């Protein structure tokens, strides 16, 4: 499928339809407090958000990115949360961004695995280049990781016989010309009360210690005595050179 990909700022009439597409994320992933700040003000970043339509005009995918000031070439340990937090701070303080990070590519359920992600990733990279950035960064969530106890520092560098990563989403990025920079060990932090975690997951959360939650990349840490649990997700920083800055 060849997508029609537009910058959201150029298609303001699509704003009201933007949330109609079903989200593929598990419920607990929708409660990152820093991420929700970004989505609550996504219109402020419309020049860095792409809307993807099929031949009929239906929105079948979305892609988010955020510019931010870092002041260093060393990528931060706080990955996804850190890019968003710095992006909002840069915007509100009127600062000059020196980095841009992909935040999320969302593809309509039923169309995942059909090759659309490579098209959308290329469009995000090209949009970053149009804004003058030499690189598109991405704190990638390796979606093939099924063992929450396996450290990301091990999983991210596991390869198949052909030398490609065993993780399918990392493969998409590397085949698109990206390179692995480092693991972001606390890329996304989701705190909640035990009642909230029970609601989000359907699990009892009645014993202190690590809790394995389906689709979580690491165990959720449960503290029954204090009535809270927290999920600290590691991601993998990928660097993509933009058009005109390759080679």
Image (tube, grey):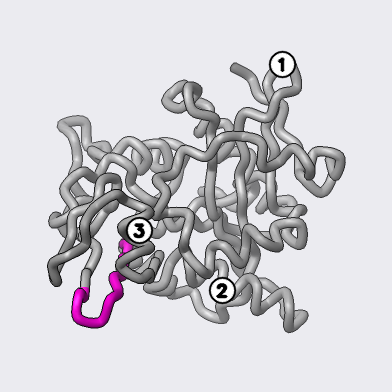
Q: Which residue is mark 3?
A: 235
Q: What's the CA distance linking mark 3 and mark 2? A: 16 Å
Q: Is residue 221 above or below residue 115?
A: below
The residue that disc 1 covers is 55
Residue 17 magenta: no
Quadrant for residue 212, please give it. Answer: bottom left
Q: Is residue 86 above or below residue 211?
A: below
Residue 156 visible in this rendered orientation of the protein? no
Give the image location of residue 27, x and y in percent.
Answer: 42, 49
Which residue appears at 41% of the width and 36% of the height?
Answer: 172
Give residue 132's position: percent from left, percent from top.
71, 59
Q: Is residue 149 left or right of residue 43?
A: left
Q: Which mark is residue 85?
A: 2
Please state which of residues 190 and 115 is positioned toward the viewer in this rendering: 190
Q: Are marks 1 and 2 in contact (CB under 8 Å)?
A: no
52 or 224, which is in the foreground?
224
């Amino acid at each position: 499928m060849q997508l029609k990909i537009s910058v959201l700022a150029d298609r303001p009439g699509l704003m009201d339809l933007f949330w109609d597409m079903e989200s593929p994320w598990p419920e607990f992933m929708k409660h990152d407090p820093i991420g929700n700040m970004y989505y609550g003000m996504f219109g402020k970043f419309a020049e860095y958000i792409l809307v993807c339509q099929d031949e009929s005009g239906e929105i079948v995918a979305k892609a988010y990115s955020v510019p931010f000031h870092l002041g260093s070439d060393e990528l931060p340990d706080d990955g996804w949360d850190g890019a968003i937090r710095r992006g909002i701070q840069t915007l509100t303080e009127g600062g000059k961004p020196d980095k841009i990070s992909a935040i999320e590519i969302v593809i309509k359920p039923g169309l995942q695995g059909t090759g659309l992600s490579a098209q959308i990733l290329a469009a995000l990279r090209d949009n970053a280049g149009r804004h003058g950035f030499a690189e598109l960064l991405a704190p990638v969530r390796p979606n093939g990781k099924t063992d929450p106890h396996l450290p990301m520092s091990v999983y991210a560098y596991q390869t198949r016989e052909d030398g490609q990563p065993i993780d399918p989403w990392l493969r998409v990025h590397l085949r698109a010309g990206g390179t692995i920079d480092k693991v972001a060990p606390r890329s996304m932090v989701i705190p909640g009360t035990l009642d909230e975690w029970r609601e989000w997951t359907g699990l009892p959360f009645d014993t202190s210690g690590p809790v394995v939650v389906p689709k979580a990349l690491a165990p959720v840490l449960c503290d029954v005595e204090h009535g809270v649990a927290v999920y600290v997700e590691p991601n993998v920083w990928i660097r993509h050179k933009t058009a005109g800055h390759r080679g």
